[in-house]
Image: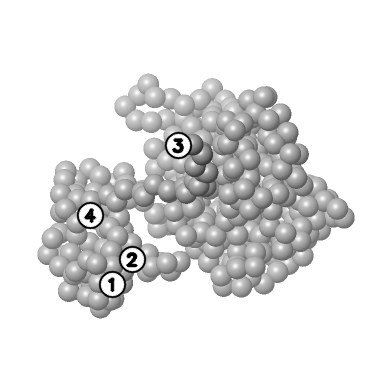
Amino acid sequence: MKLAILSRAPQAYSTQRLRAAALQRGHEVKVLDTLRFAIDLSGTEPDLQYRGRRLSDYDAVLPRIGNSVTYFGTAVVRQFEQMDVYTPNTANGITNSRDKLRANQILSRHNIGMPATAFVRNRADVRPAIARVGGAPVVIKLLEGTQGIGVILAPEVKVAEAIIETLHSTKQNVLIQRFVAESRGRDIRALVVGDRVVAAMRRSANGDEFRSNVHRGGSVEAVELDPAFEQAAVRSAQIMGLRVAGVDMLEGDEGPLVMEVNSSPGLEGLEAATKLDVAGAIVDFIANQVAFPEIDVRQRLSVSTGYGVAELVVHGAADLVGRTLGESGLSERDITVLTLHRGTSVIPNPRSSVVLEGEDRLLCFGRLEEMRSMIPERRRRRAKVRKLPKQPIPEG
């Protein structure tokens, strides 16, 4: 395999370990500076220039893109995708994960546990937002902060209002998030590769510091994940469109609470804590995918006129509840079920004997006209009626 590692820091620990792991396995590998690419759209096929010359052929590319060059870096990754070069992390996945608000919006519709979060811009909306996430203390986060930078704990509502107002005045967008006190300054970093967690560590804050990041002086230790935490980590990475990701979770009273999905996770702390060859696991996964690559279903299937991919929800009152997939009549309507989502469980390529339950979500490929006819009329959200206190009747 010929592998390109996109990195502006060739001497960084993670870049060096990935390069060494690839060389140890007999692969050809080069570290390429992300900003030295030029995207070439002048010809009949998408192409890339590197340092003024046409880029040679690569089997795979592993993006290690810093926050400061996200826009250009993802454009380069997208060009590699158009050239059919395999990448474990797509440009869309990287972009989604970099914006904390967008990441929370995407994960929130897939039953992923997360700390209660609010996003507002008007000063008058700040206090109600703090109340909705559980009241003070609250955590205030810059949307694009990294390594614990831009994460502030506000102990009181007035302090939170002052911090948010100050940040808004400097054109910064922030999230307001519930402070998960039961985590006691600890979190878990799970390194997801493909469909499994290859290593995990618990990070603990130092002293009075509530942020557990290693860059903030936090300590680390290897940890064996409960199945619920492993499932949350893998699903979060896959939902974001990332096949290599660091998923940060808090240990809430009711289970894992996903804080962040990192598309360029550092390997140093994780390998030191677990003594595992995490870099080797990443390289092995990429090599296997190059031999049998996944495809972008949306791009490849959408070219069939009248056909596409859609999600159908099995509603409780529908005729499908209690029937097997084979009895559902979907195949007769030219609809194939690719994946069945049931709560937090995912059943790929479900068998015809699977019995459908209310609120099952079916990811289907088929005739769009038929699938549209199965979608019920959109229910309108009920307006919340606020009862006003009775006013005294004036005398006279």
Marking on residue 145: none
Judge from the rendering whether residue 81 lies leftward or rightward of residue 375; answer left or right. right
Write down the residue under mark 4: 376
Q: What amino acid is at disc 1?
A: Leu
Residue bearing the label numbered 1: 356
Image-quadrant location for residue 176 = top right
Kindly report the distance in space between the C-alpha atoms of the residues bearing marks 1 and 3. 38 Å
Q: Type of residue at label 2? A: Asp
Q: Disc 4 on helix, strand or loop?
A: loop
State the separation of the CA atoms marked 2 and 1: 7 Å
Pinpoint residue 2: horizontal percent, then vertical percent.
Answer: 52, 47
Calculate the distance from the C-alpha at mark 3 to the C-alpha at mark 4: 36 Å
Q: Secondary structure at mark 3?
A: helix
Crowd rating for badge 1 (residues with CA inside 10 Å; few <14, some 14–19, many 20+): many
**Please, what secondary structure does the residue beneath circle 1 have?**
loop
Q: Residue at x 68, y 42 (%)?
A: 140
Determine contact: label 2, label 1, CB under 8 Å.
yes
Q: Residues within 10 Å of mark 3 (few under 14, many from 20)?
A: some
For marks 1 and 4 on the same chain, the one whose residue lies earlier in the sequence = 1
